[in-house]
Image (cartoon, rainbow, N blue to C red):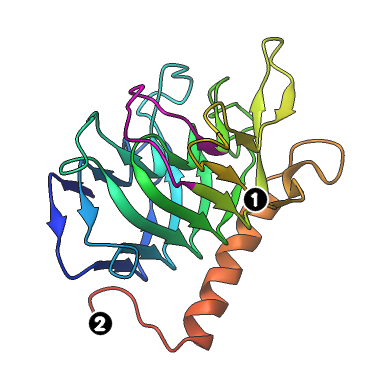
Amino acid sequence: MILNHSLVANGGDISWNQVIDTPGSSSVEDVINIFLSHGQSEENPIRIHDNYIQGVLSAAETDDDYTGDGITTDGASNDLRTATGFVDIYNNQVVHTANAGIGIAAGHDIIVTGNNIVSCGKDTNGQWIATTSAQATFMWNAYNSNVFFNNSISGTSGGLVRPNSSNNPEIEDLWSPDASTSANNVIGTNFFTDPCMSGGDVSLGPELAVYGQWLNKLTSESQTIGAGQ
């Protein structure tokens, strides 16, 4: 889903969606991409919350050039009137991503908080699906824009595993080259426990556990997904 060149004057809501992509049968770039689009203000942002995204995958399982994210802000602009902005991304669950879970790649006044990202980096046959540049979450001014400020990442839980240059597992939870005090781009407290490596080696069990948590959340919040809602 791409929100493209849109001003959401009264705020927007993207929530309670379940997206499950099957390895070998699905190919997706960003599942949710906010591209040169913005909410009206801090009080009326675009809210992206309580979504379950499983399988952010390339058509080729070993594609190290893959750049898809579960949720990202995007778009090159140095103009406040068109730049991505006023987006709140919270309480989402992202599982099994070949690249990034949730990222801030562009924009201003982007709040990323309370998300759970669990990606163990391998398929059920034990082959790597994660790229060597994958990360659970990131703050990166991808377009070197002047309009990249008032952004924050906090409260993230879970963790991501990817292969290193020797094809061994390494943890990569947070990449924040453009955190900046002067621009108020803030990395707050996050709670990575890296469950995929809890036994000393990569296990896919923690990904399955997240789906169970999602189903419990649907029940507790009396939410129905799909055509029958």
- Residue 14 place in picture, x, y as percent: 30, 65
Regarding mark 2 in the picture, which secondary structure is present there? loop
* Quadrant in the picture for the C terminus: bottom left
Q: In terms of depth relative to the viewer, which is nearer, 33 or 186?
A: 186
The reply to whether the magenta stretch includes residue 146 is: yes
Front: mark 2 or 1: 1
The residue under the point 86% across, 44% down is: 199
Find residue 196 and report its image quarter: top right
Label 2 amino acid? Answer: Gly
Asked if residue 17 is positioned above or below residue 128 in the image, the reply reads below
Q: In terms of depth relative to the viewer, which is nearer, 183 or 73?
A: 183
The residue labelled by disc 1 is 188
- Residue 191 place in picture, x, y as percent: 72, 54
Dominant secondary structure, magenta:
loop
State the count of labels.
2
Asked if residue 31 is positioned above or below residue 126 in the image, the reply reads below
What residue range appears in magenta? 137-151
Label 1 amino acid? Answer: Gly
Q: In terms of depth relative to the viewer, which is nearer, 63 or 176?
A: 176
The residue under the point 33% across, 28% down is: 146
- Residue 41 place in picture, x, y as percent: 28, 62
- Residue 17 place in picture, x, y as percent: 34, 66
Give the number of the disc on residue 14: none
Report crowding for label 1: few under 14, some 14 to 19, many 20 or more residues within 10 A (C-alpha): few
Instruction: Give the residue furthest to the front.
Output: 182
The residue under the point 40% across, 45% down is: 22
